[in-house]
Image (cartoon, rainbow, N blue to C red):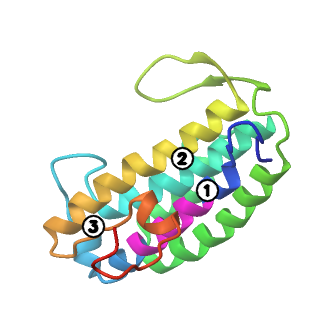
Amino acid sequence: MRDGRTGFDPVHLYEYLVKARAKLLDCVRQLTPAQYTQEFPFGLKTVRDTVVEIPLAEWTYIRRMRGDEVPPWDDRPFSRFYKTDFPPLERAWKEQAEDTRRMLREITDWARPVEYVARSADEPPFKVRTSTGGVAAQLFFHEIHHRAQAMAMLRQLGVPAQNLDYSLLMYDRMPLPRDAG
């Protein structure tokens, strides 16, 4: 739901992610299987692990906003793609995007409290308190964070992913004559 005072429209912001993602995935599609799984000394180590992390986390954030239980990491539907080639992940990600759009359209209270217990193998469980808007912000920023890692890996593989900036993809642009002020 759009906030008339601020112009905040999470569905619009998500559409930016989908457009930028499409350009990024066009680059990923060019990789050989060896490039897709080549290790790097930063981030999640491979393009595959990086691009799997994004929809896996998105799936999790959507469940958190709904108030649903989130199963352990290995039981989440996107975890299987850590061991597959790219095409099955891309198909599943498109389906996830539809679910995310629906969820973002359904939310009417971006300040509604969200609480859950986070668990990971690396640290003891901890309680998280935020809001639906906070979870949505994490969904958006988390993708941008990992997209930047994937872009750096792609560039090192000779496939530059660039021009994914919000203003380039979402602003209306009207060409003017060179001498226009």
Q: Which residues are magenta?
A: 15-24
The image's mark for residue 14 is 1
| Residue 114 visible at all | yes
- Secondary structure of the residue carrying tag 3 is loop
- Secondary structure of the residue carrying tag 2 is helix
Q: Which residue is mark 2?
A: 140
Amino acid residing under circle 3: Thr
- Secondary structure of the residue carrying tag 1 is helix
Nearer the camera: disc 3 or disc 1: 1
Asked if disc 1 and disc 2 are in contact, CB closer than 8 Å, the reply is yes
Disc with the residue nearer the chain's start (3 vs 1): 1
Classed neighbour count for the residue bearing mark 3: other residues with Cα under 10 Å, few (<14), some (14–19), many (≥20): some
Q: Which residue is mark 3?
A: 37
Nearer the camera: disc 3 or disc 2: 2
Amino acid residing under circle 2: Phe
Amino acid residing under circle 1: Tyr
User: As displayed, is residue 58 above or below residue 102?
Assistant: above
Q: Left or right of 123: which side holds 8?
A: right
Principal secondary structure, stretch drawn in magenta: helix
Residue that appears at 75% across and 50% down: 104
Residue that appears at 73% across and 59% down: 101
Disc with the residue nearer the chain's start (1 vs 2): 1
User: As displayed, is residue 5 above or below residue 155?
Assistant: above
Separation of disc 1 and disc 2 at Cα?
7 Å
* Picture coordinates of residue 59, whole percent (x, y): 64, 51
Disc with the residue nearer the chain's start (3 vs 2): 3
Find out whether residue 16 is within the magenta segment: yes
Separation of disc 3 and disc 1 at Cα?
27 Å
Q: Left or right of 66: which side holds 8?
A: left
| Residue 85 visible at all | no
